[in-house]
Image (spheres, grey):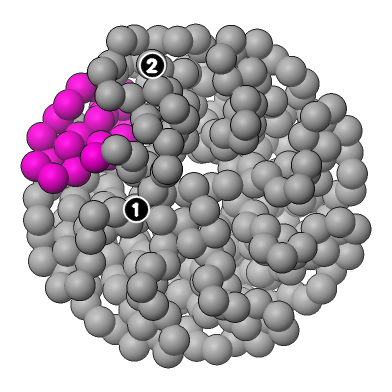
Amino acid sequence: MFRANLQHTGSYKTGGINHFKGVLWRFKTKSIVEAWFSSPTLSESTVYVGSDDGTLYAIDAQTGKERWSFKTGDVVYSSPAIADSAVYVGSHDGYLYSLDTRTGALRWKFKTGNRVYSSPAVDRGVVYFGSADGHLYAVDATSGAERWNFNAGDRINSSPAVSNGMVYFGCWDYSLYALDAETGRARWKFKTAYRILSSPAVADEVVYFGSMDGNLYALSAANGGEIWRFKTKGLIRSSPAIAHGLILFGSDDDYLYAVDGKTGQESWRFKTNGAIMSSPAVANGAVYFGSSDNYLYAVDIETGKRRWKFKASSSWMRSSPALGEGAVYFGCDDGYLYALQ
């Protein structure tokens, strides 16, 4: 699932890479038109990822060989979610798709009124996702029938997080929303000073998210009350990760930040040479993320010092990494999905 779990903490139970060796494999998509935003999802021995060529791919995690592919009607920036032998993904053609994980066969598709950037979250038989038509949808995972929808009134690129019976997501109307997962009724909303593309993360009854106003916010998950905010010098499109009591996120000011989850005080920052739109992933004391300076980085979570970096090509890395045992998977704007070991 996008960001490792329903709460979108970006914290993986697998080991990541202890000692960097190099490229395990790379997989070439059919074409790359503009950018690669879809982030890979690892489930058992298969990596699932969408591409700018409009295709969802299922790739063998060890060999990099294609197992199957499914063509949608437009580009796929949404990151796939896996639950109960089904993979769910959105497309710019306005549909959310449900496919069989083994064969790629279509189970059902659900039509919205605009592009689906948002990555779905699947909980207790319900798929939650947003659309650029301004609605957050709850759809039955088995049948594709709509349970409810909530009209936020503007584009939803943010991917919903689910925690304790609540669904949290950001919107282009500058607001973060909290809805009742069962009914779709609004519990609260919090207004920032600009659009929210970042997806929220939830831990210990606190919701963390970034806004394009340059702030990372910490709110009460119960009532939306502000606990603290941390100001950067750039837009925040990166979604936060939560690990070791730290909130980790990137900014367009070229820094990866680590701030204390309770106080909002900076613990450290790491400088790259480009905007960081990629969302960090954490495992075994390392933080993995891509930058528009064309590198994927691994940084020590305690010290903020670089462990290693990898340059795929002269292309941006906007895709967020997924972590496996001894491997890191990520997409690059050069049209390749990479597996590092």
Looking at the rendered structure, the kind of residue marked 2 is Gln
Q: Position of residue 12 (x, y in %)?
A: 42, 43
Q: First in sequence, mark 1 or 2: give its number.
A: 1
Q: Residues within 10 Å of mark 1 (few under 14, many from 20)?
A: many
Asked if disc 1 and disc 2 are in contact, CB closer than 8 Å, the reply is no
Element on which disc 1 rests: strand
| Rendered-image quadrant of the C terminus | top left
Seen from the viewer's position, the closer of residues 281 and 285 is: 285
The prevailing secondary structure element of the residues shown in magenta is strand
Q: Position of residue 162 (x, y in %)?
A: 56, 67
Q: Position of residue 149 (x, y in %)?
A: 74, 75
Left/right placement of residue 68 relative to residue 156 reads: right
Looking at the rendered structure, the kind of residue marked 1 is Ala
The numbered disc on residue 241 is: 1
Q: Pointer 2: what residue?
A: 341
Q: Tell me which corner region of the image, top left, top right, bottom left or bottom right, holds residue 113.
A: bottom right
Q: Which residues are magenta?
A: 285-309
Q: Position of residue 85 (x, y in %)?
A: 78, 42
